[in-house]
Image (cartoon, grey):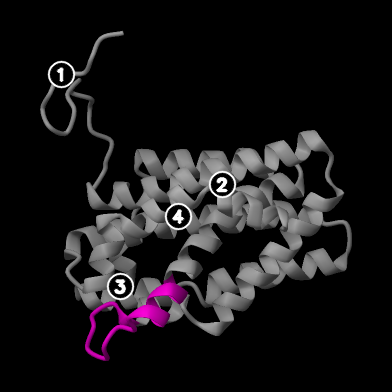
Amino acid sequence: MSFSAELHAESEDLFAAFWDHPFLAGLRDGSLEHERVLHYVGQDHQYLSAFIRCYGLGLSRSPDRDWMRFFHDNVTFLLEDETHPHHALCRAAGVCYEDAQVDRLAPSAQAYVDHMMESARDTLGVMLGALLPCVWTYIWAGARQMAEAPPAPDHPFRDWWAFYGSEECRDLLGAFRERFDALAQDAGTAERSRMAHAFELSCHHEVRFWEMAWTLEEWAPPTGESSSGAQPLLR
C-alpha cells in the first residue's frame, strides 16, 4: 500500500465527515442557500491564492525542471481552470464572481492557510502532505457524485460537480499522489511523520472549511456560549 493510501485509510472518518457535511449535502441536492454559497466562494478564492503561493515556494525549491514543470502546471490549473467552479456557483447564486470576493479570511480559513504556509516552509514532502487533502477530497467527492447520482441538466450546481468529477481532475489527483508517494519513499522516519501529520491536519481543516461556510463564520467577538446557548464547561 502506498503512503498516500495508508494516510487515506487512517483518515476515512474525516473523508466521511467531509462527504456528510450539510454544506456539501446542499451542493448535492441543490438546496444550498445563496448566502452560504457566496461566503464559500469569497473564502475559497483567498484560500486558493494561498495555495498558489505554496506552489510558488515549491517551485523555488524544486530540485530539477521536472519538479518545476509540476508546480508550474498546477499554478496554471488554479489560475485558469479552478476559477470555473467558482463561476458556476456564482451563476447559480445570481451574483458576479468579482462581487463575491472578500478581503479577509474567516478564522477557520485563516487557520487552514497558516497551516499550509507553515508546512510549505518544511520539506517538499511535508508541503505536499498539507496540500493533498484539498485536492483529494474535492476530486474524490466529485467523482463519487458523478458515478452514483450525476446531477440533472437543470441542477443549479451541476457544473461544479462535473468539474471536480472530470477525468482531467482525476488525472491531476493521480499525478499529485505519485509525487507525494515518491517523496515519502525517499524520506526518513521523522519526515514521514511530519508528512502524515500535515495530511491529517489538512483533512480536519477541510471539514472545518465546510463548517465555516455553513455557519457564515466571521470575526465576531466571542460570547462564551456554544451554538446551542449553553455555557461552556470550566476546566
Q: In the rendered view, does 183 fall on the left or right side of 89?
A: right
At 89% from the left and 62% from the top, the residue drawn is 64
Which of the two residues, 19 or 35, is positioned nearer the viewer here? 19
Which of the two residues, 82 or 5, is positioned nearer the viewer here? 5
State which quadrant residue 100 falls in. bottom left
Tell me the kind of residue under disc 2.
Glu
- Whether 144 is among the magenta residues is yes
Q: Which residue is mark 4?
A: 15
Q: Is residue 103 visible?
A: no
- Mark toward the start of the polypeptide (2 vs 4): 2
Tell me the kind of residue under disc 1.
Gln
Q: Which residue is mark 2?
A: 10
Tell me residue 22's x, y (percent): 25, 56
- Whether 191 is among the magenta residues is no
Tell me residue 156's x, y (percent): 23, 80
Instruction: Give SS at disc 2.
Output: helix
- Mark toward the start of the polypeptide (1 vs 4): 4
Residue farthest bottom in this picture: 153
**Inter-mark Cα distance, 2 to 4:** 10 Å
Instruction: Give SS at disc 1.
Output: loop
Instruction: Give SS at disc 3.
Output: helix
Disc assigned to residue 89: 3
Tell me residue 152's x, y (percent): 26, 88
Asked if disc 3 and disc 1 are in contact, CB closer than 8 Å, the reply is no
Residue farthest top in this picture: 235
